[in-house]
């Protein structure tokens, strides 16, 4: 839907559950003539991303969508696209990684490609998917950095919610047609993707990194304009009932919805609990996180991924943000919901109870904690 | 038919002389003109044409990865269509690996979807090997690390015909990633290289022939060609700025003169410094640990009076020359600063014989000893010992292995702190018990054959390779090595040698026949499929024109001989390309809407032997094997109606 509103010109995708509704709908739009785009029905995700690369380099607005194994197959080309500074926009329906094969939800796939130089945004609900995708096209094209909008497979991808769809004219005003200065054009020949000899490679990477770090300000600017035009304001992170909180939960994606409910229940009981929901994961907004989390005694980082052999990716990044800070809360890492293991409001109340105790006693103990692992199966 | 004069592929690219692929690309671009967008996968042609910030492409060009050129081209074509840009032809030009192996899936997708794209495969029937980056290469400017060599420099090389030392221009430097590295050890030499790196060896059995063998084919006892010595050069002009007369930092205690060029006395002084000296540039101090009574002390005093015009100040254990310019001068020579990284800089290799000998004398005055008939030098710098070894070899000494004791950090064979020594002696006239055959390099002024005494695995490291004009070899760590390698691909023909299908006791080169890519393209029922050869440019041009006019996918497979890979002189590319067609090893045809038509029928087919026997990659074939290939080619020609 967002892709249609954005008037994408070349779409290329290979079907994979749970991304399929996106591809099916886009194919239908193109088939009906509702969307005037080239739909390239490729033989793999690797080629899907390669088609987007070629099309974007030729000056077309491009879009693809994938999930899980498909994202892994694409990963080689993700680096090439960002290194060539092509503003491809992609939707990723978060799904677990094999083995064991799982078509269900967690965020291991997109977090595995966090270093590939793409902007990464995480959505809580379907309205956010639509809005953040529109916003991503504008952001990516203004900065020449590709953007990936991640949303939880099934939980969001296969759930119908009422969504406010902005009128086409307003979207057109927000998102002018894409016309890059540098593109493949026989009238102005140029060479794209040359060999990076040792004398220039490091500079190229440095400039790419600097541009991605600066994309945070770019996001704020675009989000501010988006808010003015459409009335929905997005920040780098959302602080939910954090005033005076002793215990803070930090998470990304649809889990924030459940967490908000848990926070409400705890607040009703008079506990000082709040939630910080991170929208922009790459570039990593460490300063904003330090500001948002410093006041708490203990922070629980809840995430649907594991950097196998260490801890959750979000925890590692958050902890690194605080390492040089004088004032820092205690951090707990909760690995939750892998392969769609249910995370209930009661589970999060338990998380709050544990975190509160840690904050009071000053000792973290086991870290990370795996929430909802069936002890009888693993011991 | 006339071709436009305009060159759309700019000269100055780094392709080998006689490269069939680059020639094919040049012709294709001429035929297509400016209204094209070219997509290339990773490969030789991409590397040689676009080392940033240079490019040879005067048409829009894009490269993304090795396996996806057809998919990227699909994206370009889709975008052009959507953006309403007409009259622009999208051309993907891949090598055989990027087409028939890793890139086959994307190509199949492109053909199946019917994109309006011309896909060209420039087929040189294999992939492209390397040395450890610390390997030392002999250039006209002296000794250099292989990783420091730049395109255009003159490297010492072995002239295969005249069997003598010549200088050849370096035409390419390649950084080839991390690979397994092995050491080849002979009584006087040691080199590190990847298993696929070719060495010049004396054929076993004592026949008087030199053949290239990859490291993986080498066995203990094999004879490899090594350097005996290099020509003696000239004294070296330093170009160091003299201190002005009144510089208060210039000298202590009296005025000091910094020499403009090298001399035997200066080299001896520097030899003593290499052994026992230190420099503190900030303090302006050059010191020597030469206690009273030590051999070098008196000599140093004599030399500094003669060369620098000053007398060192002395203490019981040390001698000092206090001068900022002198300290800067010592630092500028590249001799190393700390005891463990002292070294012999490259320029020393270009000096006169007397100067070189003087440096050695100076060194030996410090940590050198005589043991029996040989001499020994001890140092804490591994690099110094390594370069000293080559230095001694270049003076015609026989040098033993470096004996090195690690103090700590055992690691994976890459040395850190420790102490070691090398022993050396003047070589005697050839000793036939040492190498039992009278070989073709007997009495050669610059080269000789040595027996391999050990081959061992070192570990994994970054690798570098060079390409050298004409004789395609250079001298690394004192051994003659071939420049580039070649690894099999799906289109490598049966029985061909490549570095990954070597010829040994069991293997006879590539064991499978060539993958029939044009037939795979035909199976997609695309409008136009053709084969071509760089040896028949007008046939090629005609087919490019036809393919470009087709609406929809077209596939063109161009046979492109590769001088270093196939092993022939670079002047023979066209002859070999033609022989392939004249013998029926490569058949020129086109297929419009699936109907195959032969476009060039050789009047009388030549025997395949003529094509095979002028290429090194087939030089191992027996009569029976040539017969086998002949039968297979005959059958194929019959099948396509060539007879």
Image (cartoon, coloured by chain):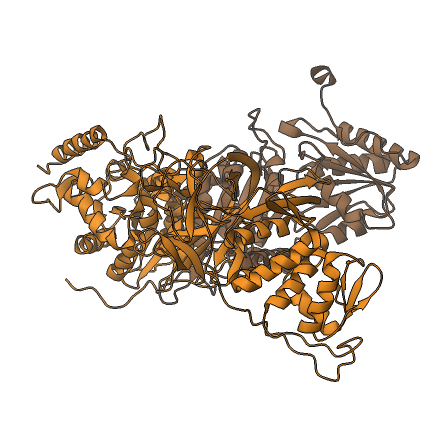
The colour one sees for chain B in the rendered image is: orange
**In the orientation shown, which residue stands out farthest toward the front?**
B372
B124 shown above or below A86: above
**Residue B100 found in image quarter:** top left
Q: Name which residue lies at 70% across and 48% down.
A: B380
- Nearest the eye: A174 or A117: A117
Find residue B24 and report its horizontal and vertical position in percent: 27, 54
**In the orientation shown, which residue stands out farthest toward the right?**
A361
Find residue B1 and report its horizontal and vertical position in percent: 14, 62
**Quarter of the C terminus of chain A within the rendering:** top right
Find residue B560 and report its horizontal and vertical position in percent: 27, 48
For this view, does B279 lie left or right of residue B35? Answer: right
- Nearest the eye: B366 or A119: B366
**Residue A58 found in image quarter:** bottom left
- Nearest the eye: B616 or B376: B376
* Chain letter tied to brown: A
- Nearest the eye: B130 or A224: B130
For this view, does B520 lie left or right of residue A236? Answer: left
Find residue A245 and report its horizontal and vertical position in percent: 86, 43
Can residue B588 be seen by looking at this rendering? no
């Amino acid at each position: 839907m967002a892709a249609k509103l954005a008037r994408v010109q070349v779409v290329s995708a290979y079907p994979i559950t749970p991304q399929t509704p996106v591809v099916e709908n886009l194919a239908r739009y193109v088939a009906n003539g509702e969307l005037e785009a080239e739909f390239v029905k490729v033989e793999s995700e690797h080629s899907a991303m390669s088609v987007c690369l070629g099309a974007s380099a030729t000056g077309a607005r491009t879009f693809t969508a994938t999930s899980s194994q498909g994202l892994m197959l694409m990963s080689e080309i993700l680096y090439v696209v960002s290194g060539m500074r092509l503003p491809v926009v992609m939707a990723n329906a978060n799904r677990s990684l094999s083995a064991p094969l799982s078509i269900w939800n967690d965020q291991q796939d997109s977090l595995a490609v966090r270093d590939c130089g793409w902007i990464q945004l995480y959505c809580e609900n379907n309205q956010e998917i639509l809005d953040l995708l529109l916003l991503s096209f504008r952001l990516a094209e203004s900065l020449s950095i590709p953007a990936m909008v991640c949303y939880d497979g099934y939980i969001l991808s296969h759930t119908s919610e009422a969504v406010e769809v902005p009128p086409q004219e307003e979207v057109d005003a927000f998102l002018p047609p894409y016309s890059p200065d540098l593109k493949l054009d026989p009238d102005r020949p140029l060479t794209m993707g040359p060999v990076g000899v040792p004398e220039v490679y490091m500079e190229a990477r440095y400039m790419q990194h600097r541009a991605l770090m600066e994309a945070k300000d770019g996001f704020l600017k675009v989000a501010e304009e988006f808010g003015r035009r459409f009335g929905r304001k997005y920040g780098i992170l959302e602080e939910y009932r954090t005033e005076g909180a002793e215990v803070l939960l930090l998470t990304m994606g649809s889990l924030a919805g459940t967490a908000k409910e848990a926070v409400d229940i705890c607040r009703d009981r008079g506990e000082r609990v709040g939630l910080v929901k991170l929208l922009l994961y790459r570039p990593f907004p460490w300063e904003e996180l330090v500001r948002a989390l410093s006041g708490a005694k203990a922070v629980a980082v809840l995430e649907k991924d594991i950097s196998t052999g260490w801890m959750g990716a979000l925890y590692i990044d958050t902890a690194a943000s605080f390492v040089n800070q004088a004032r820092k809360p205690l951090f707990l890492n909760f690995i939750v919901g892998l392969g769609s293991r249910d995370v209930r409001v009661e589970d999060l109340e338990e998380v709050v109870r544990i975190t509160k105790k840690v904050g009071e006693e000053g000792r973290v103990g086991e870290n990370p904690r795996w929430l909802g692992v069936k002890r009888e199966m693993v011991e | 038919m006339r071709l436009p004069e305009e060159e759309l592929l700019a000269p100055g690219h780094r392709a080998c002389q006689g490269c069939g692929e680059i020639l094919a690309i040049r012709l294709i671009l001429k035929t297509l003109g400016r209204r094209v967008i070219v997509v290339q996968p990773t490969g030789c042609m991409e590397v040689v044409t676009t080392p940033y910030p240079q490019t040879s492409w005067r048409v829009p060009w894009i490269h993304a990865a090795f396996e996806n050129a057809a998919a990227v081209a699909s994206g370009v074509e889709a975008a052009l269509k959507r953006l309403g840009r007409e009259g622009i032809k999208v051309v993907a030009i891949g090598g055989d690996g990027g087409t028939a192996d890793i890139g086959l899936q994307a190509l199949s997708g492109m053909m199946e979807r019917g994109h309006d794209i011309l896909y060209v495969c420039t087929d040189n029937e294999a992939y492209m090997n390397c040395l450890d980056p610390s390997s030392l290469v002999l250039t006209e400017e002296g000794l250099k690390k292989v990783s420091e060599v730049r395109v255009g420099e003159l490297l010492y090389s072995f002239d295969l015909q005249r069997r003598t030392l010549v200088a050849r221009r370096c035409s390419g430097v390649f950084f080839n990633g991390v690979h397994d590295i092995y050491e080849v050890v002979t009584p006087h030499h040691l080199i590190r290289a990847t298993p696929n790196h070719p060495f010049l060896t004396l054929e076993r059995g004592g026949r008087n022939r030199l053949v290239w063998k990859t490291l993986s084919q080498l066995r203990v006892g094999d004879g490899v060609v090594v350097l005996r010595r290099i020509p003696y050069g000239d004294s070296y002009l330093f170009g160091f700025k003299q201190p002005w007369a009144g510089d208060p930092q210039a000298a202590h205690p009296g005025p000091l003169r910094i020499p403009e060029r090298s001399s035997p006395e200066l080299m001896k002084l520097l030899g003593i410094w290499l052994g026992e000296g230190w420099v503190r540039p900030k303090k302006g101090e050059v010191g020597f640990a030469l206690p009273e009574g030590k051999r070098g002390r008196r000599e140093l005093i004599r030399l500094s009076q003669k060369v620098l015009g000053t007398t060192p100040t002395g203490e019981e254990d040390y001698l000092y020359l206090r001068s900022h310019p002198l300290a800067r001068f010592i630092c500028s020579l590249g001799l190393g600063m700390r005891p463990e990284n002292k070294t012999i800089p490259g320029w020393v290799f270009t000096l006169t014989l007397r100067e070189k000998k003087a440096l050695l004398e100076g060194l030996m005055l410090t940590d050198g000893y005589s043991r029996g008939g040989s001499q020994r030098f001890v140092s804490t710098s591994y690099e110094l010992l390594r370069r000293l070894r080559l230095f001694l070899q270049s003076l015609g000494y026989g040098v033993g292995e470096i004996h090195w004791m690690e103090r700590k950090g055992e690691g994976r064979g890459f040395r850190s702190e420790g102490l070691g020594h090398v022993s050396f002696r003047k070589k005697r006239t050839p000793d036939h018990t040492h190498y039992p055959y009278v070989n073709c390099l007997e009495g050669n002024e610059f080269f000789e054959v040595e027996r391999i005494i050990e081959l061992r695995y070192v570990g994994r490291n970054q690798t570098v390779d060079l390409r050298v004009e004409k004789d395609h070899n250079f001298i690394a760590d004192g051994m003659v090595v071939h420049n580039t390698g070649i690894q099999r691909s799906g289109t490598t023909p049966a029985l061909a040698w490549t570095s990954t299908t070597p010829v040994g006791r069991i293997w006879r080169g590539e064991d499978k026949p060539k993958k029939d890519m044009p037939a795979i393209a035909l199976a997609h029922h695309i409008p136009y499929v053709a084969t071509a050869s760089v040896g028949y440019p007008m046939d090629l041009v005609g087919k490019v024109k036809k393919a470009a006019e087709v609406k929809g996918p077209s596939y063109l497979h161009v046979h492109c001989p590769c001088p270093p890979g196939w092993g022939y002189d670079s002047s023979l590319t066209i002859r070999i390309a033609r022989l392939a067609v004249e013998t029926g090893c490569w058949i020129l045809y086109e297929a419009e809407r699936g109907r195959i038509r032969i476009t060039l029928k050789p009047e009388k087919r030549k025997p395949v032997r003529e094509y095979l026997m002028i290429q090194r990659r087939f030089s191992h074939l027996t009569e029976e094997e040539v017969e086998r290939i002949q039968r297979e080619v005959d059958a194929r020609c019959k099948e396509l109606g060539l007879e």
